[in-house]
Amino acid sequence: GLDCLDKVQEEMQKMVSQSEILELGRFPDLRDRVFEVVSQLLRNCMGPSQQMISNLIQIELAYINTSHPDFVGGKAAVSAAQQSRKLQHQPSSAAGAG
């Protein structure tokens, strides 16, 4: 996930360097300053972006897939617990027959 962020940042840097307009060519100091500010902005966004990606990955890892066939949902879990409890408290028929 974070490797992708590096590639996106690199691509955005390329886009910035390729997006020079002709008018900026007359003002080299302004052009350099604009590119510097935009590059710094991209670098400043890396930290929050990395944190957001890490959070999203953690959210996905913690997700419980309730649609999975092995998942026992609320009603089914209560029903299974009640059924198990009934079976534990029922006297066995074999003990009374002997």
Image (cartoon, grey):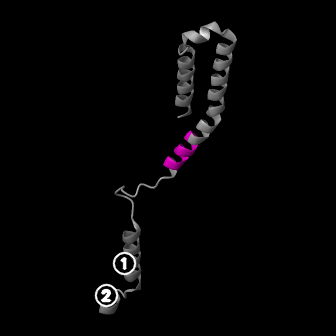
* Position of residue 23 measured from the top left corner of the image (x, y, whole percent): 58, 11
In the rendered image of this protein, does residue 75 appear above or below residue 3?
A: below
Can see residue 98? no
The residue sitting at 39% across, 64% down in the picture is: 72
Label 1 secondary element = helix
Q: From mark 2 to mark 1, how far is it between C-alphas?
A: 17 Å
Dot 1, how many residues are within 10 Å of its Cα: few (below 14), some (14-19), or many (20+)? few
Q: Which residue is mark 2?
A: 93
* The one of 4 and 49 positioned closer to us in this rendering: 49
Instruction: Magenta stretch: give its range.
Output: 53-60
* Three-letter code, disc 2: Ser
Q: Residue farthest to the top?
A: 26
Which quadrant holds residue 90? bottom left
The residue sitting at 53% across, 44% down in the picture is: 56
* Position of residue 10 measured from the top left corner of the image (x, y, whole percent): 56, 22
In the rendered image of this protein, does residue 66 appear above or below residue 35?
A: below
Q: Which residue is mark 1?
A: 83
Label 2 secondary element = helix
Can see residue 6? yes
* Position of residue 37 measured from the top left corner of the image (x, y, whole percent): 67, 23
In magenta segment, residue 86: no
* Three-letter code, disc 1: Gln
* The one of 37 and 28 positioned closer to us in this rendering: 28
Marks 2,1: beta carbons within 8 A: no
Q: Residue farthest to the left?
A: 97
